[in-house]
Amino acid sequence: MAPFMVPAFVPLSELGLFLLGVFLVLVMPGPTNTLLAAAGLERGFRRSARLTLAESAGYFIAISFWGMFLAQLAHGMPWLPLTVRLVSAVYIAYLAVRMWSATLDLTDGNGRAVDMRALFVATLLNPKAILFGGTIFPKAAFMSIAGFAELMGGFLALLFPIGLLWIALGSQLGRGRLAWLKPVYVLRGASVVLAAFSVTVAWSAIH
């Protein structure tokens, strides 16, 4: 082995498929991405960029938990996945109401819709975390510290730029680059998107 070469614990072909799956799921609109864009719109890129730390912490905890314990917990407590999805749906609905109300603060410059705690909890309860932990991350990743570290490192390497991209999108809207698109309407549209996600998650849990 060449000096300083880091051994690969996951075959390159599997790693490539894993990263592709992570990218496709992370880049899709969802509760976390909607909140990141809203934060960029309200507070600008620089003040909102740190929210990606809350996003990464939320995903790290949720993916680790679901990846390690989903099968065992679901076997002993078959009601648990349903309960988690319903709790997620309720919290996302709460965020939708909070964001709609926060549009009133735009007139005095006090955006309070998104903070570190709200984004962390939203990510922790994001249904995407269950998809990552239960499907996209291979089961073998949770049986080896080295393998888990390698895959989680790749996951985070994609998470930060994608999260910053969503914040930048909101920031550009907030700067008036699209004059016809008023920030209040964008935030209320984001509120509607969150409400739709809430209904979708609740419906999928019940059916």
Image (spheres, rainbow, N blue to C red):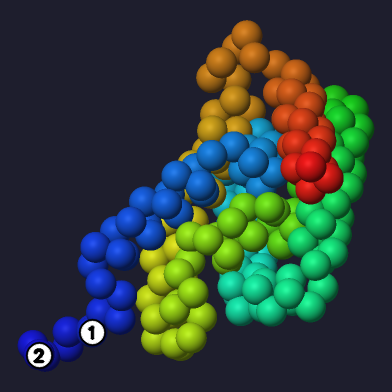
Mark 2 crowd level (few <14, some 14–19, many ≥20, 10 Å Cα): few
Q: Position of residue 126 (x, y in %)?
A: 70, 53
Q: Position of residue 87 (x, y in %)?
A: 86, 55
Q: Is residue 77 above or below residue 204?
A: below
Q: Is residue 15 above or below residue 72?
A: above
Task: Residue at 65%, 73% (x, y): give it.
Answer: 71
Return the residue at label 2: 1
User: Which badge, 1 or 2, is on the more N-terminal residue?
Assistant: 2
Residue 112 appears in view: no
Q: Describe residue 147's horizontal placement relative to residue 190 as left or right.
A: left
Amino acid under label 1?
A: Pro
Secondary structure of the residue carrying tag 1 is loop
Amino acid under label 2?
A: Met
Nearer to me, 76 or 19: 76
Task: Residue at 77%, 31% (x, y): give it.
Answer: 196
Could you say which disc has been placed on residue 7 in the image?
1
Q: CA distance from mark 1 to mark 2?
A: 9 Å
Which quadrant: the N terminus? bottom left
Q: Position of residue 165 (x, y in %)?
A: 49, 42
Mark 1 crowd level (few <14, some 14–19, many ≥20, 10 Å Cα): few
Residue 23 appears in view: yes
Nearer to me, 75 or 83: 75
- Total labels drawn: 2
Task: Residue at 23%, 84% (x, y): give it.
Answer: 7
Q: Position of residue 79 (x, y in %)?
A: 84, 64
The quadrant holding residue 43 is top right
Q: Are marks 1 and 2 in contact (CB under 8 Å)?
A: yes
Secondary structure of the residue carrying tag 2 is loop
